[in-house]
Amino acid sequence: MPVESPYPLVSIDHALNTILAHSPLLDEETVPLEEALGRVLCQDVVAAMPVPPFPASAKDGYAIIADDPSPVRKLVGEQTAGRVGDLRVVPGTAVQIMTGAAIPEGADAVVMIEYTSRRDDEVIIEQKVPVGNEIRPVGQDIEQGQKVLDRGTTLGPAEIGLLAAVGLDRAPVYRQPRVALFSTGDELCEPGQPLAPGQIYDSNRFSLAAAVTQSGGIPHTIGVVDDTPQALEQALAEALEVGDVVLTSGGVSMGKLDLLKPLLEAHGRVHFGRVVMKPGKPVTFATVGETPVFALPGFPVSALVSFELFVRPALRHMQGDPAWRRPRLHVKLAHALHHDAHRTEYQRAAIEVREGEFYARTTGYQGSGRLLSMVGAHALLELPPGDDYLPAGATVTAILLQPIGTL
Ligand code: AMP
Ligand code: MG
């Protein structure tokens, strides 16, 4: 009799829905704009003031009365940006004005410096301009009371600039999830140290910490933990102390020292322990108290693919990002491929654009230990079970992991 796992194989959708149901929205906080990049707004932002807040010149030139018939105007002063003098334009006069400066009283148009000539303290207007010419009216860019950003927006450079433009020095955002993580395995050695026989370097801790950061979380690294119940127990307790989320790798399959599942059963509830996917089948999700715990498989690609499919959505969801799902794209295969007939397989691929069409080329041998198969991958190809062969030119779904560069 083959040894069977006691955990039923659940579908990817079931797994994801279970995770989202146990990934609560985090609290709100405000952060200085300098620290707001990538954070998610927890409120709509309404402009308390118009932009520009005063009628402003759009060009360097002269502020005039548009319908003033006199071709030559006497200069009565100059107005630079940020300085408002006691100036008044009346028929027969003009004020020299710079871009961004307030329009002086009496003036109703600006004529660009290129359409004028200067004679001592007089300016000759060489082109007639309409009322309002080159004047940016109050609220041209943003009206007072206008909603400028929606709750759930991820802040990038333009959004952060907009907050500053309406006078805010802090952004109201959701807190970032703190993710406590450790690697399990007696065979794991710290990079930088010499390897003893039978050892390999711990790569998951570093790849997963980077993936946490990229997902907007704050990694809290606990380290390498030996495959003993005591060491794992202690590491889990520490992780639960500091983490909004706990993330582990290794120790979830059918080996003698795969101790994570029983440990999580003892302390909380294991929601699933196997998913119909490749790689990543033994991925395990539990809650201990309210804390979501992801126990990812140890193979480096399995760990990252299951992070991508399950942990990243949870971390984005907890930060209030409605776009927690990656974009999906239909692509054509640049070559034939074989895939798993029984589980949804995620093969790593580079995407090329040829004559406006997207083509996917897998990144070589797709072994779940071969991290190089994720290097240069723009996407995961989602290959549903069934026929295990797809010819070149077949259309498949690609989950985009990063922008498609020119190749
Ligand atoms: P496990 O899931 O613990 O059975 O591990 C599966 C495979 O992944 C084994 O070959 C492990 O040596 C390897 N592995 C486990 N953890 C790590 C890690 N943190 N970094 C690199 N390889 C790992
Ligand atoms: Mg192990």
Image (cartoon, grey):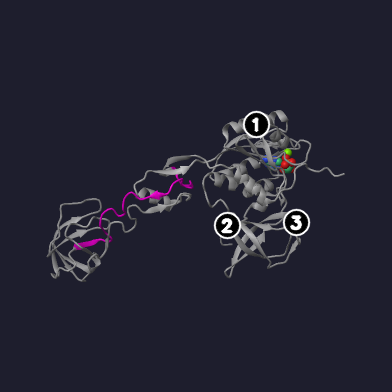
| Residue found at x 33% / y 49% | 48
Q: Earlier in the sequence, mark 1 or mark 2?
A: 1
Marks 1 and 2 in Cβ contact (< 8 Å): no
Q: Main secondary structure of the magenta part?
A: loop
Distance, label 3 to label 2, CA atoms, is 23 Å
Tag 1 residue: 235
| Residue found at x 59% / y 45% | 314
Q: Is residue 42 magenta?
A: yes
User: Residue 168, how many percent across, how many down?
Assistant: 36, 45
Q: Amino acid at mark 1?
A: Ala
Circle nearer the viewer, 1 or 2: 2
Which residue range is magenta in the image?
35-63
User: Residue 404, how many percent across, how many down?
Assistant: 57, 59
Q: Is residue 118 left or right of residue 244?
A: left
Secondary structure category for the residue under label 2: loop
| Residue found at x 72% / y 66% | 391
Distance, label 3 to label 1, CA atoms, is 36 Å
Tag 2 residue: 327
Q: Quadrant of ligand 2?
A: top right
How packed mark 1 is, by other alpha carbons closer than 10 Å (few <14, some 14-19, many 20 or more), is: many
Tag 3 residue: 340
Q: Amino acid at mark 3?
A: Asp
Q: Amino acid at mark 2?
A: Pro
Most distant residue in the right direction:
1
Secondary structure category for the residue under label 1: helix
